[in-house]
Amino acid sequence: MLTLTPDLMLRAYANGIFPMAEDADDDELFWLDPPERAILPLDTQFHVPRSLAKFMRRMPFTITTNQAFAQVIHGCAEKRPERPETWINRTIIDTFTSLHQRGHAHSVEAWHDGHLVGGLYGVSIGSAFFAESMFSRVSNASRVCVVKLVEHLRDRHFQLCDVQFTNDHILQFGVYEISRAEYHTRLQQACATPAQF
């Protein structure tokens, strides 16, 4: 079995492959390169639901980036009543934390009254961002983080935001799927184009 290291993780992402575990308590990892890949649009196809746009006009959260990476990844790994299982195991946490220390893994945080109430994290290579997971302890916190992530990536001229799979939570933002072949073409171009998160 391959030992998961930060360098191996970066090579895998640059080649369209990402790791997952069956469960947080499972030490084994498996690698995925699905036939279709979900993309979060960074152009005009990105959609902010009307109710969320209204909520953001009276923004109750303070949004930061890279201020609480460890708290965010542990928040994403928490088992909660609405999500009793998680794929984020200790190996994933340790490797992504090392990537964060090297400037390749990043977090977006939502705070309310000084408390972390939501966030997301992912990996950047060139102008590609690979969103991994998100969590929310209060209503709309993770949704606001998605909007702020897209704004952040647009401002820094990122070309690609990979969210791996579709689900009801992210479909509302205009997420769409592309074939593996198209994904690899776009990935190669984005990874070769410099950008700073």
Image: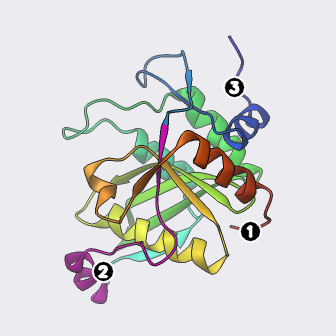
Q: Earlier in the sequence, mark 2 or mark 3?
A: 3
Task: Let me know if residue 154 is in the magenta part.
Answer: no
Of the numbered discs 1 and 2, the one sitting upstream in the chain is 2
Disc 1 is placed on an element classified as loop
Q: Residue 24 versus residue 17: which sits nearer the camera?
A: 17
**Residue hosting label 2:** 60
Under circle 2, the secondary element is loop
Q: Is residue 160 left or right of residue 119?
A: right
Tell how many labels: 3
Task: Say which residue appears at 59% left-offset and 71% top-offset.
Answer: 153
Frontmost residue, 160 versus 78: 160
Q: Separation of disc 1 and disc 3 at Cα?
A: 25 Å
User: Which quarter of the figure is the C terminus placed in?
Assistant: bottom right
x and y percent of residue 103 in the render? 74, 56
Q: Is residue 183 above or below residue 54?
A: above
Q: Classify 103 as above or below 51.
A: above
| Residue topped by disc 3 | 4
Q: Residue at coordinates 42% horizontally, 21% vertically from top-left?
A: 22
Colour convention = rainbow
Instruction: Tell me where residue 195 appears, x and y as whole percent.
Output: 75, 68
Q: Which residue is mark 1?
A: 196
Q: Is residue 109 left or right of residue 193?
A: left
The quadrant holding residue 112 is bottom left
